[in-house]
Image (spheres, grey):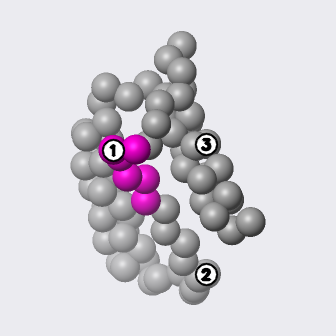
């Protein structure tokens, strides 16, 4: 298992959105395709990162954000 690494030279982005009504069927399908395309593009940039390492990076990012609020 690889230990956590510093986020010093990396960026983690997290977006939060207010809930809204679901789009109609045609709009929903277009959004689904867009989300899948974005996820594939993001995933293609992280092929050498293990799931454990990605989890550790997320934990570090959340801890840093929590520290800023306190």
Callout 3: SS = helix
- Look at 45% across and 83% down and name the residue there: 24
Q: Which mark is residue 26?
A: none
Identify residue for label 1: 9
Kindly identify the residue that appears in the image at 51 percent across and 39 percent down: 57
Mark 2 or 1: the one toward you: 1
**What is the x, y in percent for residue 27?**
37, 79
Residue 59 has which mark? Answer: 3
The image quadrant where one finds the C terminus is: bottom right
* Magenta stretch in the rendered image: 8-13
Q: Mark 3 or 2, which is nearer the eye? A: 3
For residue 9, above or below residue 67: above
Task: Name the spot of residue 13 as percent of width and height, x first.
Answer: 43, 59
Left or right: 29, with 2 as reference point = left
Relative to the observer, which residue lies in front, 9 or 14? 9
Q: Is residue 12 magenta?
A: yes
User: Which marked residue is nearer to the observer: mark 3 or mark 1?
Assistant: 1
Q: Which residue is mark 2?
A: 19
Asked if the stretch drawn in magenta spans residue 35, the answer is no
């Amino acid at each position: 298992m690889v230990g956590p690494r510093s986020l010093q030279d990396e960026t983690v982005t997290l977006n939060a959105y207010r809930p809204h009504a679901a789009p109609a069927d045609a709009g929903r399908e277009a959004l689904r395709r867009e989300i899948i395309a974005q996820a594939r593009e993001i995933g293609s940039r992280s092929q050498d990162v293990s799931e454990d390492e990605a989890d550790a990076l997320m934990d570090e990012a959340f801890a840093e954000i929590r520290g800023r609020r306190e």
